[in-house]
């Protein structure tokens, strides 16, 4: 691979590097900023770090809420049953209880409130019938609760990350707040609240907007708060747990038809594709040099012939255009020969060749090969034809072709 080819390939790659660097930086920064549910301090009532919720727990205790911190889903459901319905079950990591636990929430005592933090669509389907996750943002947004929201009196909060909507065909009463990021529905006598972001519960975000007010309102509705402090996926127990209540599980026939689910693609993918397309279009326009066919224009200044020929020659050589290069030399030679022979500068072949034969004594087919022959196939043939043209012009005009001569 020649150095020229390597440079050409680098020119194609370089415009993409800033775009890729920006995307890489955004992904890394987002990963560093995003909290990890597997962190033991994540939304824990004992966690004092930036992602902990020790400050939130103190605010709840100040309101008279009794907090039971449990580390297993079975123990959490038992504690809620013991409260007899005057309890809130707080599940900060709905993806970690073992398989089937979320579907058992419908067996809890009536009037129980269940708060789930950012469950995905499959987790939402296990917990409730009427709701599904509709879309997920790259970063959490801030919005107001909305005019019809009676779930809380809090002001604007950073909670818009995952939104939830009601399935078509469901007749449940759904209360949507914060643009669908906080949703409440009552099913089988239980109150389910889905929150689209963990930010309102994190210590590092508590002082922003009215995050703390929203979190306290959601968790202080009952006198008892059962806090599931779980940070790793639970293993399925060797035998099914005992029944928790004399309540029939939800019949399959009563579940509403789910007509559509959320998109399998993240929201940020659209903007990545748009950015790459914009970068590609910029490269095409930058390297296109011109749009449409070449347009002849008069030169604004007089340019030496050798300088013009050298410039064209470099361009033709770069693209291996031997035919156009030789035709440029032939056209100039034919004009000079016609003028020297007293003919019009645009004299045709049938007029020019006989006049040249009379002047030089060369055979017409030889002169035609020099002035009108086929394009060269190699650089050596191009050089040979260029020398023949120069010699013919010098012989007919009786003057050498000077490099500084103007044309």
Image (cartoon, rainbow, N blue to C red):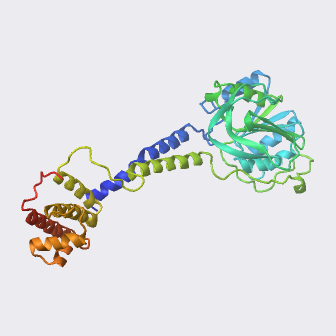
Left or right: residue 113 compared with residue 279: right
The relative height of residue 69 versus residue 267 in the rendered view (above or below) is above
- Taking depth in this image into account, of 328 and 137 the one nearest to the observer is 328
Residue shown at 28% from the left, 64% from the top: 324
Residue shown at 17% from the left, 60% from the top: 339
Q: Measured from the top left, where is residue 318 in percent x and y? A: 27, 59
Q: How many marks?
A: 0
Residue shown at 21% from the left, 53% from the top: 308
- Taking depth in this image into account, of 52 and 10 the one nearest to the observer is 10
Query: In which quarter of the view is residue 396 placed?
Result: bottom left
The quadrant in which the N terminus is found is bottom left
Q: Measured from the top left, where is residue 196 in percent x and y? A: 70, 38
Query: In which quarter of the view is residue 390 placed?
Result: bottom left
The relative height of residue 111 versus residue 385 in the rendered view (above or below) is above
Left or right: residue 293 compared with residue 402: right
Q: Is residue 101 visible?
A: no
């Amino acid at each position: 691979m020649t150095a020229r080819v390597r440079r050409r390939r680098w020119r194609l790659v370089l415009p993409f590097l800033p775009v890729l660097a920006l995307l890489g930086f955004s992904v890394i920064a987002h990963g560093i900023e995003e909290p990890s549910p597997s962190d033991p301090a994540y939304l824990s009532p004992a966690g004092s770090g930036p992602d902990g919720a020790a400050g939130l727990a103190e605010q709840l205790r100040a309101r008279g809420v009794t907090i039971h911190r449990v580390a297993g889903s079975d123990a959490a459901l038992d504690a809620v049953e013991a409260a007899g319905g005057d309890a809130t079950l707080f599940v900060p990591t709905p993806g970690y209880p073992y398989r089937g636990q979320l579907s058992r929430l419908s067996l809890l005592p009536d009037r129980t409130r269940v708060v789930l933090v950012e469950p995905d669509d499959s987790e939402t389907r296990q917990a409730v019938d009427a709701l599904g996750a509709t879309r997920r943002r790259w970063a959490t947004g801030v919005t107001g609760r909305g005019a019809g929201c009676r779930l809380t009196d809090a002001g604007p909060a950073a909670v818009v990350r995952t939104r939830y909507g009601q399935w078509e065909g469901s007749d449940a009463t759904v209360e949507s707040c914060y643009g669908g990021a906080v949703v409440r529905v009552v099913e089988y006598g239980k109150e389910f609240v889905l929150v689209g972001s963990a930010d309102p519960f994190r210590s590092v975000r508590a002082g922003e907007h009215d995050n703390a007010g929203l979190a306290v309102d959601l968790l202080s509705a009952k006198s008892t708060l059962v806090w599931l402090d779980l940070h790793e996926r639970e293993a399925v127990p060797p035998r099914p747990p005992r029944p928790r209540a004399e309540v029939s599980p939800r019949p399959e026939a009563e579940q509403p038809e789910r007509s559509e689910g959320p998109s399998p693609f993240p929201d940020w993918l659209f903007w990545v594709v748009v950015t790459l397309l914009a970068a590609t279009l910029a490269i095409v326009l930058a390297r296109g040099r011109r749009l449409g066919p070449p347009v002849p224009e008069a030169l604004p200044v007089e340019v030496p012939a050798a300088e013009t020929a050298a410039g064209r020659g470099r361009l033709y050589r770069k693209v291996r255009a031997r035919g156009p290069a030789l035709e440029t030399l032939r056209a100039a030679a034919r004009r000079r020969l016609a003028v020297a022979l007293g003919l019009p500068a645009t004299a045709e072949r049938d007029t020019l060749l006989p006049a040249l034969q009379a002047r030089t004594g060369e055979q017409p087919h030889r002169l035609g090969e020099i002035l009108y022959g086929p394009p060269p196939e190699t650089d050596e043939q191009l050089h040979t034809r260029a020398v023949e043209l120069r010699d013919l012009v010098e012989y007919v005009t009786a003057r050498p072709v000077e490099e500084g001569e103007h044309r």
